[in-house]
Image (spheres, rainbow, N blue to C red):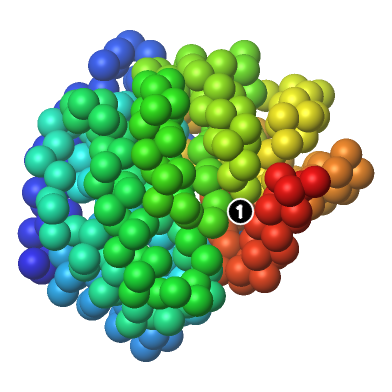
Amino acid sequence: MAQESRETRREKRKLPLADQAEHRPAPRRRHPDWIRTSLPTNPTFFDVKRRVQELDLHTVCQSASCPNIGECWTRRALTIMILGDICTRSCRFCDVATGKPLPADPDEPRRVAEMLAELDLEHTVITCVDRDDLRDGGAAHWAETIRRVKQACPDMTLEVLTGDFKGDTGNVDVVLGAEPDVFSHNLETVPRLSRQVRVQASYPRSYKILEHARAQGAVTKTGLMLGLGETLDEVREVLRECRDLGVDIVTLGQYLQPSPKHLPVDRYVPPEEFDALREYALSIGFPHIESGPLVRSSYHADGQAEMVRELRRNKARAALS
Ligand code: SF4
C-alpha cells in the first residue's frame, strides 16, 4: 500500500486526546544544535522503506517520528512494531496514533520474519502498540512472532520491547516462553511524572513487569526520557532502583515533543549531563548504558549482539551455581 494513503488512514483514525485542557498546544521550542539530524539520502534507507511497505509492516521508527531514522535505516537497523499501528493508549509523549485498533493480523509474524531474514542483522528490536482491547494484551501474537523470527534468523539475537500487559505477569510469561534474548520494558520517566506522561500506565506496574521478567532469568532492559521536568537526582534514584533490581541495560535520551498536542519539552539536557549519567550508571554496576540526546530504546541496539550473548551466558551460569 502506498505510504501516502497509509499515513492518511492513520491520521483519520487518530482520536482527540482525552484532556484537551491539559493538552493545549504549547509553543514549540527550537532544538539546540546537538539535536540536529540529517535527511536520509542513502539508497539503503529507501530499500528498507520499500520493503516495509511491500510487506505491509509497521515500524516505530516511522510511527513515532524517530529523529534517527536516516542513520538507523542506512545501517538496515529498524524497529518493527507489531499488532498494528493503532494504540489503545494515549501517552502524552508518543506520536503513535491512538484509537480502536484492527484485529491482530495472524499473518504478521510470518512477514516480520521474512523482513528480518532479508535484513540479515546481528541483533534487532521488535516492539508493539499497546493492545488493551485483547484479552491477553497480544501475548500470544508476540510469542508467535518471536518463534517465527527465531526460526528464520537463528543467528540473530532478538530484543522485545513490550507494554505492561496491564500488570498481568502471566502474559509476560507467554512472551518469555518464546525465549527472546532481551526483555525490554520502558519506565519512560521518573515516578513523580509517570501518571502525567503515561496516562493509562503507572510506574509501580512497569517496575513489577521488569521485576518479574528479571526473576524469570531474562536479560532485562529499560529506558527513560529526560527533559520532561525530572531532576537529575530523581534519574539517579531510578537508575539505582533498576540496578538493585538487576536490570542489565538502560537507555537515556532527550524527550522531543512530536507535535503541539504533546507534552512540551521542559528542558534540553546538554550532552555533558548525559555523559555524567552514563558514568554514574556504569559506576553502580550497569553492564551497559546508552545515554545521549538522540538515544531511543533501540538506538544502536543493532551492535549489541555480542554483549547480549555474554549477558545470557552469565545468567545461565548464575542459574546453575
Ligand atoms: S532509534 Fe530505534 S526507533 Fe529510532 S530509527 Fe533507530 S531503530 Fe528506529
Residue at point 55%, 52% (across, down): 182
Seen in the image, is 145 located left or right of residue 106? right
From this view, report whether residue 320 is shown above or below residue 2.
above
Residue at point 62%, 42% (across, down): 217
Q: Position of residue 46 (x, y in %)?
A: 31, 80
Seen in the image, is 108 located left or right of residue 120? left
From this view, report whether residue 16 is shown above or below residue 272.
above
Q: Quadrant of residue 91?
A: top left
Residue at point 9%, 49% (across, down): 9
Residue at point 20%, 30% (across, down): 134
Looking at the figure, which quarter contains the N terminus?
bottom left
Seen in the image, is 138 located left or right of residue 37? left
Q: Residue at the right extreme?
A: 283
Dot 1 amino acid type: Val
**Pointer 1 residue Cβ closer than 8 Å to ligand 1:** yes
Give the residue number, with chain letter if any, for mark 1.
295
Q: Position of residue 309 (x, y in %)?
A: 65, 65
Q: Residue at the front extreme?
A: 320
